[in-house]
Amino acid sequence: MSDDKIVKTIRGYQRKIKCIDGLDSLMGIAIMIAFAVFVFLFVYMVALSYKPIYFGMIMAFFVVLLMLFWVVGKQVDRLQKKMKQFIGEHVVKYIIAERITIQEYKPHGCFDRDFLSSSGALPDFSQSYGSDYIKGIYRGKEIIYCDIKLERKGNDGTFIVFKGSVVSLPLGRPLVGKRVRILEKGSKPIDFIENAYINAETKLYRALGIKKGEEQTVTLESVEFNNQFEVKATDEELAFYILTPQFMENIVSADRLAEGRTNICVGSDRVDIAIHNNYDAFEFGNTMKNKKQLEESRARMRADLNKILSVVDEILKKDKLF
């Protein structure tokens, strides 16, 4: 498809969304006014024993407005998803193909819940959302990528615990029942109760002589690395084998390139890299007006991809893992 048609199609979607959003805002104001009138008539009717006909009409109008407000909101969501699908298929996919041999690409795709839950690079969560699921071959290695947002419910409501990029690379040799987690300090908050539970569980395992699956904090020789990252491993020897001085330098370099908090988990049959930077890659930020803006968007997406792959490049330097 030509750039002119791409720009025209995206502009069409954006105009429709803007128009419906405006209608949605007006309906929101109308709902607030109708509710105020509804309350006023209710008080008036109770105080003066007024006939309820107007009260019933306003109530019906209020309910109809609520239903229309919901329908219009769904329409906006539908148009945004269609625009995302179009941009993915006609713009993003071609940007990715410049660096990765694509096997699968889904603009609205996401890692499944089991995958996310089993990743030691990610925090606990209640709900997950994803976009731009990519599976392909990069530098002869399989790579799976997705933009992820994780939320967790707490006593004060739902809050975001992770937003950023997640990359998964298969290990050359599976680590059955073993894993090493490199967690940037401050990237996984643990409250007092959770910390007490972990300590109690560890003490119980040790008392019973159970070592399977138990994680220990590993202190490395590099003070700078220890200050920046916390290393947890089920096998201390494996941690020292993986985290050589050179690979620690690669991880620090990868974290600097990522411009976010970086967690890495080596275990089972894969290496997971989670970059918490509050950023959603491969998105259009501005209203599309012309081909110049389209090219600017492509340049930004190429920069997004280059940043992600530069982090992967640093991890792939550990040849014996892959």
Image (cartoon, rainbow, N blue to C red):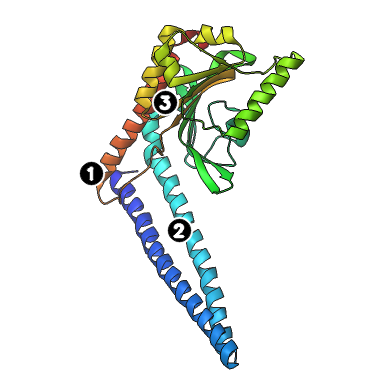
Q: Given contact means CB atoms under 8 Å apart, are the residues at marks 3 and 1 in contact?
A: no
Q: CA distance from mark 3 to mark 1?
A: 25 Å
Q: CA distance from mark 3 to mark 2?
A: 32 Å
Q: Return the mark for residue 100.
A: 3
Q: Which corner quadrant of the image does residue 95 belong to?
A: top left
Residue farthest to the left? 292
Circle nearer the N terminus (1, 2): 2
Q: Mark 3: which secondary structure?
A: loop
Query: In this rendering, is residue 255 above or below 292?
Result: above
Circle nearer the N terminus (3, 2): 2
Circle nearer the N terminus (3, 1): 3
Please name the amino acid that badge 2 sits on: Val
Residue wearing tag 2: 76
Residue 103 in view in this figure = no
Q: CA distance from mark 1 to mark 2?
A: 26 Å
Residue 199: image location, x then y, percent: 64, 24
